[in-house]
Each structure stands twice: as structure tokens, then as C-alpha cells.
Image: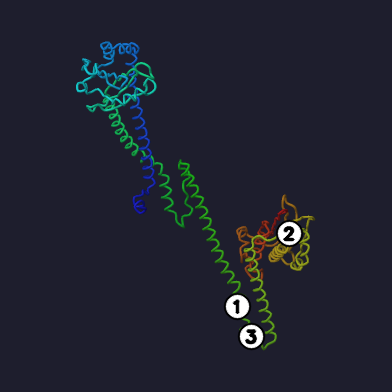
């Protein structure tokens, strides 16, 4: 059953909407048609009943009852005969449920009667007045026993000639103990014809409305779904090389515009993620290449010294000492390189470190002696403000200062170099500034100085500096301490690093 349902399931959104619209239209037209039919039927029958009830008002019931009690047959017949016309039949039923008089719907309005000698009363001869509807005696007695004057009561039955008849009654005499019952009936075949005609008109009209509705609905839904089709065609054109394609967000339809906006947002995220992935891959490729190069150089040097020693240089004491010292120096450089890489990896794995409230002046003063040794003959100017309390990891910030001073030493003249360290308050943060009068950084390279193994063109030689990991470590530590770092530099003038620490956690 489920397979059959899936097989015949409409998958097109346009046709699903058209089918739904068609079903709703059918339901509405059916409700309207049925309601119209019922209301028209009720109106026609109610109008016919009211027209028959009017005839009762033309009878003086007290006078008619008196004539019946006095057995004045001619007068009673005359009164009832006045109710009968071309489209109306009249009958009088006595209190025992017996039909006493009948007046057929004929132009002459003649009374057909037969005298019953046994009962000493007049009776109708049924075969002469067969078009007048009759009920059984028990049914008439039941009607006589009903409460009220029967003004709202009517019945619709088929007579012996299969004519549809509408019947109304009116009690004669006391309502609780009537002396008889007057029955008026009229054929209502014309009402049935009117109703059938109305049904035919409704069906034809509904079919026309459904046809027009389908045509208009298809056109409207096709126009409505055009932006969706455009989105589909645009999305199908997008591939990994065309992630910059965007959908129109002004289609004139709120839902479609929201969909387009959401899809564009998703495309932007995908594009950014893809570019980030490409950047990371390129960065990793460059990192592996640079790391391999940096590792290969000292390893090659060590390997060369070992070969020299194996060829007999070990017998020469001076050559042996030179080779061993060179290998020791290269191994120390390898150790520093590996330690720096491990530190960067650790900082990346633990992006946020535990910080404590420290006095920035005290932290810097603790390492000033080491900084002066590192600077050699360069001048170090220190200007530290009191009572600047910041939340930092003290050991890591010392590492940052060492790296920045080492960077300044590498880029300043040994005799004329000046390195300045100062602290100050800047709005809601504390500022640490480290500046030098060195060679400066080319503007095009400022965005790259925190990349691993990056060295400017002026310092490609290893003798002029380290492996290009110092500033990368600085950036990682600053980020892990929830601080910020900025740099200003000018070629031939110098470089200044600004570090901003939070005063509160």
C-alpha cells in the first residue's frame, strides 16, 4: 500500500498546490451548493405551507363547528368547498379519525359522496377522488392528539398517482379535545422541478468555476513559484570555484526572500570556511616546508662534522674541539626550535590559561637584569607606572617581553640601538609599549609577522635572527591571556608593539 501511495504521489510542488487548491474549491462549492439547495428547499416549502395556512384564516371555525354539531351538511360542505381550488384538495376528518368529506382538485370542485344507510352518514367514494392523499385512522387520531393548533406541522407524501403532495391540518373546536380536523393538500411537483433545475445549474456552474479556477490557479502558482525556480537554477550553477555567487534577496515574496537570505548566509559561511581551509592548508604546507628547511640545515651541518671526524679529523685536537663545539651549537639550535614548536602547539591546545592579578611594574622589573644582558651595548629606557594591576599569566608575559626584546635586538644596531619599555593606563585597559629604532617592517609584511617561520627580506640569514617563531609565540600567548597586541612600524625609523591587558576578569 505504501509503495502504491509513493508511486502515485505527486512530487511537483506546483501540482501539489494546484491539487490542494482544487480540493478546497470543491469543498467550498459543495458546501455552498448544499446550503443553497437546503435554504431554497426550505423557503419554497415554507412559502407553500404559509399560503395553505392562509386558507384556514378564511374559515370561521366557530361557525363551522356549529354547523357540524347541528348536522347541517350543506353548510359545512359549502364552507370547505370554499377552500378548494384548482391546485388544492380539502378533506374533513372527524374526531374518530374517519374521513367525512373530500374535495378533489378539479375546476368544478364537485363533491363526490355516497350515503351510508348503516352508519346514517355521508362517506366519500375513494375511487372517484383517488388524488386526495389520506392517512390511516390511527395516524389521524395521533395527529388529533398532538398539542397546539398544528400551525407549524406539515407532511410531504406521494399519493396513489405518484404525485408529491404537501399536507397541512387545522383542528376544529377545542385544541385539547377537537371535534375534527381540516386537511388541505396541494401538489408540489413543481417545487421538485425547481430544486432539480437548481441542482443542475449548481453542478454546471461548479464545473465552470473549477475549470476556470484550475486555469487561473496554475498560472498564479507558476508565477508565484518563479523565484523558487530561479533559486533552484542558480544553486545548480554553484560549484567549488563559484562560491561567490549569491541569490537575489528582492523577489517580492517574504518567504522566498528569507530563504534566499538564509541560503546566501550559508554560502558566505561555506565560502569563509573553504577559504579558511585553503589558508590553513597553505599555511601548513608552508610550515612543513619551512620546518623541514630549518631542521635540515643544522642536521646537515652536524652530519658534515661527523663525516669530517670519521675521516680522521678526530685525531687533531683543535679540529675535534671545533667540530664538537659546532655540533653542540647546532644541537642547541635544534632544541630551541623543537621547544618553540612544542610551546606553540601547547598554546593552541590550551587557548585560555589561568591568570592572576599581578602588578605589571613588578613583573617587568623582575626580568630587567636579563633584558640588559640580552641587549648588550644597546640602550634600554624603562618608564613604568605604579599600581597598574592586570590579570595575566606572569611567566607567559615574561616570555612575551623576552621575545619582543629579542626581536628588537635583532633589528637594531649594536651600538646605536635604543629599546624603550613603558606602561600606562588607556581607558579601561593597561598598555605595555615596547619600541625600537631599528630597521622597521615593510607595510606589506605587517600582516605576516605573526606567521610561523616568517622573516623579513632584510633578515633571511640565520645569523641575523632566530627561526621566525618568536612573534608567533608572542601572538599565541597574548591570545591565551585574553589580551590584544598591535604594531606600528616604518622602514628606517623603527617598530613599536602595543599590548593591552584587561584590568578585570
Residue extending furthest toward the right: 386
Name the quadrant of the C terminus. Answer: bottom right
- Frontmost residue, 412 versus 320: 320
Given this view, does label 2 or label 3 mark the residue nearer the observer?
Answer: 2
Residue 492 x/y as whole percent: 67, 60
Residue found at x 28% / y 30%: 196
> Mark 3 = which residue?
309
Q: What element carries label 3?
A: helix
In front of the other: 438 or 231: 231
Residue at the spot of label 1: 300
Please state the total of marks drawn on the protein image.
Answer: 3
Placement of 13 over or under 410, stated as above or below? above
Q: What element carries label 2?
A: strand
Q: In this view, does 240 lie above or below 188?
A: below
Mark 1 or mark 3: whose residue is earlier in sequence: 1
Q: Residues within 10 Å of mark 2 (few under 14, many from 20)?
A: few
| Label 1 environment density (alpha carbons within 10 Å; few <14, some 14–19, many ≥20) | few
- Percent x, y of residue 325: 69, 80
Inter-mark Cα distance, 2 to 3: 53 Å
Horizontal arrangement in the rendering, residue 489 relative to residue 101 (left or right): right
Q: Can residue 391 be seen in this view?
A: yes
Mark 2 sits on what residue? 356
In the picture shown, does residue 217 fall above or below 323? Answer: above
SS for callout 1: helix
Residue 88 appearing in the image: no
Q: Distance between the residues labelled 2 and 1?
A: 45 Å
Amino acid at each position: 500500500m505504501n509503495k502504491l501511495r509513493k508511486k502515485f504521489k505527486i512530487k511537483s510542488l506546483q501540482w501539489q498546490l494546484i491539487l490542494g487548491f482544487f480540493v478546497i474549491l470543491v469543498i467550498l462549492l459543495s458546501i455552498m451548493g448544499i446550503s443553497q439547495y437546503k435554504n431554497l428547499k426550505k423557503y419554497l416549502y415554507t412559502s407553500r405551507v404559509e399560503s395553505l395556512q392562509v386558507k384556514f384564516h378564511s374559515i370561521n371555525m366557530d361557525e363551522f363547528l356549529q354547523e357540524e354539531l347541528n348536522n347541517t351538511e350543506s353548510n359545512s360542505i359549502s364552507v370547505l368547498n370554499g377552500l378548494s381550488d384548482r391546485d388544492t384538495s380539502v378533506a374533513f376528518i372527524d374526531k374518530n379519525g374517519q374521513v367525512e368529506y373530500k374535495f378533489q382538485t378539479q375546476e368544478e370542485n364537485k363533491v363526490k359522496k355516497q350515503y351510508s344507510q348503516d352508519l346514517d352518514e355521508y362517506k366519500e367514494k375513494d375511487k372517484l377522488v383517488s388524488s386526495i392523499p389520506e392517512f390511516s385512522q390511527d395516524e389521524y387520531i395521533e395527529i388529533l392528539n398532538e398539542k397546539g393548533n398544528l400551525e407549524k406541522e406539515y407532511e410531504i407524501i406521494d399519493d396513489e398517482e405518484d404525485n408529491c403532495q404537501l399536507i397541512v391540518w387545522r383542528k376544529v373546536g377545542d385544541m385539547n379535545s377537537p371535534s375534527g380536523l381540516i386537511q388541505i393538500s396541494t401538489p408540489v411537483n413543481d417545487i421538485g422541478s425547481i430544486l432539480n433545475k437548481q441542482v443542475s445549474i449548481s453542478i454546471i456552474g461548479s464545473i465552470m468555476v473549477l475549470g476556470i479556477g484550475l486555469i487561473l490557479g496554475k498560472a498564479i502558482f507558476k508565477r508565484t513559484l518563479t523565484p523558487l525556480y530561479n533559486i533552484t537554477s542558480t544553486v545548480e550553477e554553484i560549484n567549488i570555484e563559484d562560491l561567490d555567487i549569491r541569490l537575489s534577496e528582492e523577489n517580492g515574496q517574504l518567504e522566498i526572500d528569507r530563504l534566499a537570505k538564509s541560503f546566501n548566509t550559508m554560502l558566505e559561511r561555506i565560502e569563509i570556511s573553504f577559504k579558511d581551509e585553503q589558508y590553513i592548508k597553505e599555511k601548513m604546507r608552508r610550515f612543513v616546508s619551512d620546518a623541514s628547511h630549518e631542521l635540515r640545515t643544522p642536521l646537515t651541518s652536524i652530519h658534515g662534522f661527523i663525516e669530517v671526524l670519521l675521516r680522521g679529523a678526530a685525531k687533531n685536537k683543535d679540529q675535534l674541539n671545533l667540530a664538537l663545539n659546532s655540533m653542540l651549537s647546532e644541537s642547541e639550535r635544534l632544541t630551541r626550535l623543537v621547544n618553540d614548536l612544542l610551546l606553540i602547539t601547547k598554546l593552541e591546545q590550551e587557548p585560555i590559561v589561568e591568570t592572576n592579578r599581578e602588578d605589571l611594574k613588578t613583573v617587568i622589573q623582575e626580568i630587567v637584569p636579563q633584558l640588559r644582558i640580552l641587549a648588550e651595548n644597546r640602550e634600554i629606557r624603562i618608564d613604568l607606572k605604579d599600581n597598574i594591576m592586570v590579570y595575566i599569566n606572569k611567566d607567559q608575559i615574561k616570555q612575551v617581553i623576552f621575545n619582543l626584546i629579542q626581536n628588537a635586538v635583532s633589528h637594531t644596531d649594536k651600538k646605536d640601538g635604543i629599546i624603550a619599555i613603558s606602561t600606562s593606563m588607556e581607558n579601561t585597559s593597561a598598555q605595555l609599549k615596547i619600541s625600537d629604532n631599528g630597521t622597521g617592517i615593510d607595510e606589506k609584511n605587517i600582516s605576516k609577522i605573526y606567521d610561523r617561520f616568517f622573516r623579513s627580506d632584510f633578515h633571511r640569514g640565520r645569523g641575523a635572527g632566530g627561526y621566525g617563531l618568536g612573534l608567533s609565540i608572542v601572538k599565541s600567548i597574548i591570545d591565551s591571556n585574553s589580551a590584544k597586541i598591535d604594531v606600528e612600524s616604518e622602514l628606517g625609523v623603527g617598530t613599536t608593539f602595543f599590548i593591552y591587558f584587561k584590568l578585570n576578569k
